[in-house]
Image (spheres, helix red, strand yellow):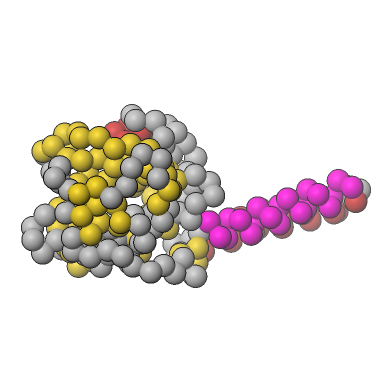
Amino acid sequence: MKLDRNSYGTIFLIYLLCAGVIWALLRFVGIWWICVPVCGAFVWAACWQTMFHMVPCRSRSGSGNLVTAISDGKVVIIEKVFEGEWLRREALQISVYMDFWDVHANFWPLTGEVSYTKYHPGKHFMAFKPKASEENEHHCTAIRNSDGREVFFKQLAGGFARRIVCYAREGMKVEAGAQCGIIKFGSRIDYFLPPDAALKVKLGDEVRACETVIAEI
């Protein structure tokens, strides 16, 4: 396990804030029954946030045809929709919601080539709401496999997320299970797959990045 390369500044600020609060409590309050639990809570928060921004080592189940989970989380939407930004056709949408306790590093779902990538500024509705897919801040990416089939996905910011990091560049060769970015705080991933994809998950399933196969295309 290692710290995400774009999160060193975030972790430094969190540690600085926690250290500042602890110093102020010890310096100006000095009452042990107040200082001990409050200081302990800030130390716990610093440790939790460190784990939150870590990139876990996972076994890789994906390939050019097996689509794996981009993130940890829970399947909250499965439906057929019209994807109008890039695919411009009917697609099978699967949405995975990440809560505060999930690792938020993201991983490529498919081996292939990045055919499209674009960042969209937006609002910050709670990520489990359906309208979040269109109105929230998000980053869109499409990957084309060696058979010419594409998987399109969105990294969506949630009510508390304020930064989406995506390493995609058009023409970039990617491998399923390698890190593709991170979303900082509660958020969601939307997958848009070919409508004939063989689905391997159902509503309510808990998925693990890199390891859980979402579908076969």
Residue 121, by quadrant, is top left
Lateral position of residue 181 relative to residue 64, left or right? right
Q: Is residue 12 above or below residue 92?
A: below
User: What residue is at 41 percent from the left and 67 percent from the top?
Assistant: 58
Looking at the image, can residue 6 be seen?
yes
User: What residue is at 20 percent from the left and 35 percent from the top?
Assistant: 80
Secondary structure mostly taken by the magenta-highlighted segment of the chain: helix
Q: Is residue 37 magenta?
A: yes
Lateral position of residue 80 relative to residue 76, left or right? left
Residue 201's spot in the image, x, y percent?
Answer: 32, 47
Lateral position of residue 139 relative to residue 188, left or right? left
User: What residue is at 58 percent from the left and 55 percent from the top?
Assistant: 49
Q: Is residue 191 magenta?
A: no
Residue 86's spot in the image, x, y percent?
Answer: 15, 44
The boundaries of the magenta stretch are: 33-52
Residue 129, by quadrant, is top left
Q: Quarter of the image containing the C terminus? A: bottom left
Looking at the image, can residue 182 be seen?
no
User: What residue is at 24 percent from the left and 52 percent from the top?
Assistant: 215
Task: State the residue in front, 151 or 200.
Answer: 200
Numbered circles on residues, count: 0
Residue 52's spot in the image, x, y percent?
Answer: 53, 56
Q: Is residue 75 above or below residue 19?
A: above
Residue 31's spot in the image, x, y percent?
Answer: 91, 48
Lateral position of residue 171 relative to residue 206, left or right? left
